[in-house]
Structures are given as structure tokens and as C-alpha cells.
Amino acid sequence: MKIGRVLISTEDIDRRLAEMGAEITEDYRGKDLLLVAVLKGAFMVMADLSRQIDLPLDIDFMAVSSYGAATQTSGVVRILKDLDAEIAGRHVLIVEDIVDSGLTLEYLRKNLEVREPASLEVAALLVKTGIQQVPVACRYVGFEIPPDFVIGYGLDLVGKYRNLPYVAVMEDEGF
Ligand code: PRP
């Protein structure tokens, strides 16, 4: 596998996150907003999106691990790190880098909803089209992308490439 064509450039990511941040700023004005990023992939979106939101918000992180094949989610999720604080009565916005099968998000929604937040929404930079195994309700979506294997901007291939400042497609090198 090698890094293939750039699917979404740094400039496009910056521009879209600024738009999403402005929208979130309007929607949550006057509310107690808590951004919850899902490690590890969402660390970069969290850093850049939060800086585009002009509100006195809080941030927290969860780490989850899905059982199953390395490049595919099984839907069985284990919490490696839970939130530091309770979320009852707070407006929670989950920040994700990518929604693929949608199973991780479905698990997280159910897990967080029972903690009775005032509201629970999702902001995802990337949503793969046509392959969600469960309906995904993302209030804020950066880009809809085809179901290719993508890396960069938080997304990894066996742990590597997360630091690329753009999203690229992985390609087979061929023989
Ligand atoms: C990625 C991504 C989402 C999940 C989406 O995380 O950050 O959390 O997969 O896939 P799904 O919609 O099919 O459930 P991953 O499990 O690769 O962990 P990572 O963020 O630590 O790389």
C-alpha cells in the first residue's frame, strides 16, 4: 500500500471546519457546550474545529476500541477511557473524524444518552456514503466521501499517517 491521491486538501479541510465552527457557534450560543472527541482519530479535528467555535466550551475525550478486523469495525466496542466528568444536563457534541459503518457512533450514542445530557449531537469531518450498517444522524458533516480506504488528518493505517495534514486514498502498489 502507498499513499495515493489527495482526496481532501488542507485548504478544503480548513475552509469546511471554519463553516462548521460558525454554524456550531450560532446553534450553541448561550448553552453549556461540551465537545467529546473519540480517540485517537478525532484528535486533529478536535483541535482544529474547537478553534473555529467562538464560545466558552469544554472538551473531553473518550477512547474506544472495536473488536474485529483491523480495518473494519465489528460494532462491539470496548471503552478504554471514559469521560472525566458527568454530562447530565449538558449539551454534548461528539466530534468524530470519520463515520464508516456507523457502528461506533451508534454504540456511543446509546452509551451517552443514558447519562441524560441536555442534548446529544454529532459533528463528523468525513462520512462514507452508501455503507452505513445503521442509520447515522450527524448534525454536522464536513464531507461525504466514497467508501475507499482513507488516511491522514487523524486517520491511520496500522497506526501511521495520522499526522498528514490532508486526507488521502491508500492505493495498492501492484506487482
Ligand atoms: C475510526 C473512527 C471512528 C470509527 C468509525 O476509529 O475514528 O471512531 O473508526 O468506524 P465505524 O463507523 O465503522 O464504526 P478506529 O476504530 O479506527 O480507531 P482510531 O480512531 O484510534 O484509529
Image (cartoon, rainbow, N blue to C red):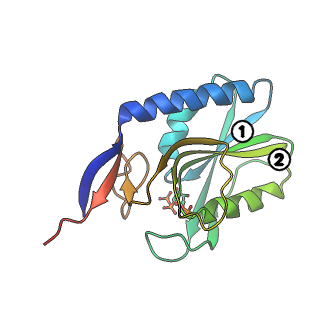
Q: Secondary structure at mark 1?
A: strand
The picture places residue 156, in percent across and down from the top left corner, at 39, 57
The picture places residue 3, in percent across and down from the top left corner, at 25, 54
Q: Amino acid at mark 2?
A: Pro
- Residue drawn at (63%, 69%) of the image: 78
Question: Which quadrant holds the N terminus?
Answer: bottom left
Q: Is residue 151 left or right of residue 99?
A: left
The picture places residue 117, in percent across and down from the top left corner, at 83, 47
Task: State if disc 1 and disc 2 touch (CB < 8 Å).
Answer: yes
The picture places residue 134, in percent across and down from the top left corner, at 65, 65
- Residue drawn at (68%, 57%) of the image: 82
Circle 1 residue: 34
Q: Is mark 2 within 8 Å of ligand 1?
A: no
Can the viewer see residue 51? no
- Residue drawn at (80%, 24%) of the image: 30
Question: Which quadrant holds the C terminus?
Answer: bottom left
Q: Amino acid at mark 1?
A: Leu
- Residue drawn at (61%, 25%) of the image: 22
Residue 110 image label: none
The CA distance from mark 2 to mark 1 is 10 Å
Q: Secondary structure at mark 2?
A: loop
Q: Is residue 143 above or below residue 110?
A: above
Can the viewer see residue 138? yes
Q: Is residue 132 left or right of residue 6?
A: right
Extreme residue in the bottom direction: 68
Q: Is residue 136 left or right of residue 162?
A: right
Residue 117 image label: 2
